[in-house]
């Protein structure tokens, strides 16, 4: 620390006392811990979650397309099998 910073720190300590200085130090360390937690934990989790959501969206679109195909095939089967029976029934 520079002489000026040391003087300012001593003046703050003299004016507000040791408990306030300790609280300021604790606040600084809590801030550093929060920043570290954000960078090392929160951001990777959010990034992985976004990738998961994109993957799920693509899967849902694929399932939707497959269900549309299945519906068309079922409609074709209905028209080929059931309708001729209905038409031939008295």
Image: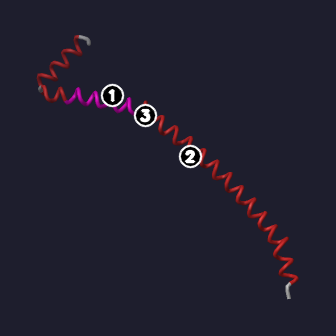
Is 32 one of the magenta-colored residues? yes
Secondary structure of the residue carrying tag 2 is: helix
Q: Return the x and y of residue 89 as percentages of the image width and height.
A: 85, 85
The answer for how far apart the CA atoms under marks 2 and 3 are is 18 Å
Q: Is residue 73 above or below residue 88?
A: above
Judge the density around disc 1: few (<14), some (14-19), many (≥20) Cα neighbours within 10 Å. Answer: few
> Mark 1 — residue?
32
* Tag of residue 41: 3
- Tell me the residue at 16%/29% (across/down): 20
**Going by the image, does 33 lie left or right of 74?**
left
Q: Residues within 10 Å of mark 2 (few under 14, many from 20)?
A: few
> Residue 21 location in percent, x, y?
17, 26
Q: CA distance from mark 1 to mark 3?
A: 14 Å
Q: Which residues are magenta?
A: 23-37
Q: Which residue is farthest bottom?
A: 90
Secondary structure mostly seen in magenta is helix
The earlier-in-sequence mark between 1 and 3 is: 1
For marks 2 and 3, the one nearer the N-term is 3
Q: Which residue is mark 2?
A: 53
Residues at marks 1 and 2 touching, judged by CB atoms closer than 8 Å = no
Residue 25 picture quarter: top left
**Do callouts 1 and 3 mark residues in contact (Cβ within 8 Å)?**
no
Q: CA distance from mark 1 to mark 2?
A: 30 Å
Disc 3, SS: helix
The total number of labels drawn is 3
Q: Nearer the viewer, residue 78 or 41?
A: 78
- First in sequence, mark 1 or 2: give its number: 1
Residue 49 lies, with reference to residue 74, above or below; the image says above
């Amino acid at each position: 620390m520079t002489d000026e910073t040391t003087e300012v720190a001593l003046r703050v300590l003299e004016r507000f006392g040791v408990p306030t200085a300790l609280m300021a130090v604790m606040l600084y360390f809590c801030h550093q811990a929060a920043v570290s937690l954000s960078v090392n934990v929160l951001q990777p989790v959010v990034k992985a979650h976004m990738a998961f959501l994109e993957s799920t969206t693509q899967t849902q679109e694929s399932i939707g397309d497959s269900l549309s195909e299945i519906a068309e095939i079922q409609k074709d089967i209905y028209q080929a099998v059931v309708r001729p029976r209905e038409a031939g029934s008295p």
